[in-house]
Image (cartoon, rainbow, N blue to C red):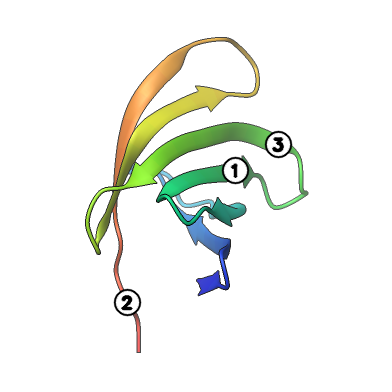
Amino acid sequence: ENQNGLLSGWLIYPGRSQKLNISGSLKKDGKITLRESNPKGKLTGVFNGRLSTDSTIEGTFKKATNSKVLPFKFYIENEY
């Protein structure tokens, strides 16, 4: 969900059943920062990327527990 540049939502990794919360911001230049946290609110990672098109976000993900950086690509789905 995007409310005036403040983003919120959730994600589920393939093979997992636990929803993780994501929240962050979308800048006017298309840059996005999302913080991922477990249901108890503990930070599990950070996504830094850019809105590539109207329906994709691409960038890098860094886990909170180590310095490993991985690429990511989100496909945005609208639920009505």
Tell me the amino acid under the disc marked 2: Asn
Which residue sits at x=63%, y=33%?
A: 44
Marks 1 and 3, how far apart at CA: 6 Å
- Using a 10 Å C-alpha cutoff, classify the residue at mark 3 as few (fewer than 14 neighbours), some (14 to 19) or many (20 or more): some
Tell me the amino acid under the disc marked 1: Glu
Which residue sits at x=58%, y=54%?
A: 25
- Using a 10 Å C-alpha cutoff, classify the residue at mark 2 as few (fewer than 14 neighbours), some (14 to 19) or many (20 or more): few
For disc 3, the marked residue is: 43
Q: Which mark is residue 36?
A: 1
Q: Does residue 40 lie above or below 2 as drawn?
A: above
> Circle 1 sits in a helix, a strand or a loop, which is it?
strand
For disc 2, the marked residue is: 78
**Which of 53 and 45 lies nearest the eye of the viewer?**
53
> Which numbered disc, 2 or 3, marks the residue that appears first in the sequence?
3
Marks 2 and 3, how far apart at CA: 25 Å
- Using a 10 Å C-alpha cutoff, classify the residue at mark 1 as few (fewer than 14 neighbours), some (14 to 19) or many (20 or more): many
